[in-house]
Image: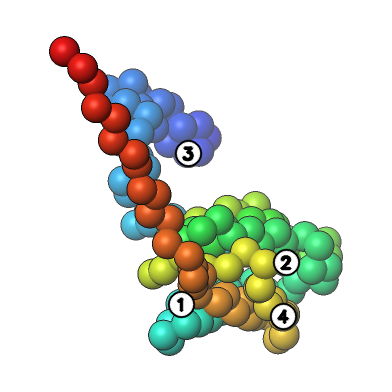
C-alpha cells in the first residue's frame, strides 16, 4: 500500500468536496513559505533578507518589483551526491514568493547581493514629486 497514493486520493476527494481554493488558506501552515524572509523598513528604504542556501548561480533566482510588490522566484537545490535522503528539514525545490511591501518602491533603483546563503535586497521608496491630480473641465449643457 502506497501511503502517498492514499494521501493524494484523500486530497482529491477533499478538493472535490470543498473546492480547490480551500487548501490555499492552509498553505502557510501545512507547508511553510519558501524561501524564508526577514523584512525591515526605515522612512525611505526597505531591506529584505532572503534565505537561499547553496545557491551556486545567481541567475537561478529572479527578483522582480512592481510598485509595492516584491517577487522572488527560483530554485533551491541542495546536492548530496548519490546519498539517500533520510530526513529533510531544509525545504528545497522551485519557489515563488510575492511580498507585499509597506510602501511603493522605485523599480529603477534596487540593490541585491548574495553572501553566505543569504540574499540581501535593498529597495528605495518611490517619491513622486508631481501630483497625479488632473483638473477636469466642466462643460455646461443647455436644456
Residue found farthest to the left: 143
- Residue 117 image label: none
Residue labelled with disc 3: 3
Residue labelled with disc 2: 78
Q: Closest to the observer: 73 or 16?
A: 73
Mark found first going from the N terminus, 2 or 3: 3
At horizontal 29% and vertical 30% (from top left) the residue drawn is 139
Considering the numbered disc 3 on the image, is that residue within a helix, a strand or a loop? helix
Residue found farthest to the top: 143
Q: Is residue 4 among what the camera can see? A: yes
24 lies above or below 5: below
Task: Answer with the quarter of the image where residue 83 lies.
Answer: bottom right
Q: Decide: few, some or many residues near mark 1? Use Cα within 10 Å; few <14, some 14-19, many ≥20.
A: few
At horizontal 32% and vertical 26% (from top left) the residue drawn is 19
Residue labelled with disc 1: 39
Give the percent coordinates (x, y) of residue 109.
Answer: 66, 73
Q: Decide: few, some or many residues near mark 2? Use Cα within 10 Å; few <14, some 14-19, many ≥20.
A: few
In-image side of 53 versus 36 (left or right): right
Label 3, label 4: how far apart the Cα atoms are: 42 Å
Mark found first going from the N terminus, 1 or 3: 3
Observer-side mark, 3 or 4, equals 4
Mark found first going from the N terminus, 4 or 2: 2
- For the residues bearing labels 1 and 4, Cβ distance under 8 angstroms: no
Give the percent coordinates (x, y) of residue 72.
Answer: 60, 60
Residue labelled with disc 4: 113
Observer-side mark, 1 or 2, equals 1
Label 1, label 4: how far apart the Cα atoms are: 15 Å
Q: Is residue 97 among what the camera can see? A: no
Amino acid at each position: 500500500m502506497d501511503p502517498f497514493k492514499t494521501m493524494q486520493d484523500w486530497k482529491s476527494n477533499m478538493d472535490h468536496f470543498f473546492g480547490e481554493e480551500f487548501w490555499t488558506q492552509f498553505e502557510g501552515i501545512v507547508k511553510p513559505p519558501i524561501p524564508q524572509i526577514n523584512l525591515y523598513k526605515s522612512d525611505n528604504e526597505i531591506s529584505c533578507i532572503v534565505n537561499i542556501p547553496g545557491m551556486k548561480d545567481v541567475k537561478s533566482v529572479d527578483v522582480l518589483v512592481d510598485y509595492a510588490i516584491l517577487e522572488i522566484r527560483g530554485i533551491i537545490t541542495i546536492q548530496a551526491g548519490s546519498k539517500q535522503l533520510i530526513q529533510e528539514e531544509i525545504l528545497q525545490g522551485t519557489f515563488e514568493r510575492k511580498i507585499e511591501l509597506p510602501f511603493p518602491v522605485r523599480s529603477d533603483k534596487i540593490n541585491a547581493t548574495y553572501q553566505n546563503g543569504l540574499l540581501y535586497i535593498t529597495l528605495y521608496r518611490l517619491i513622486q514629486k508631481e501630483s497625479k491630480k488632473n483638473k477636469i473641465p466642466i462643460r455646461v449643457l443647455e436644456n
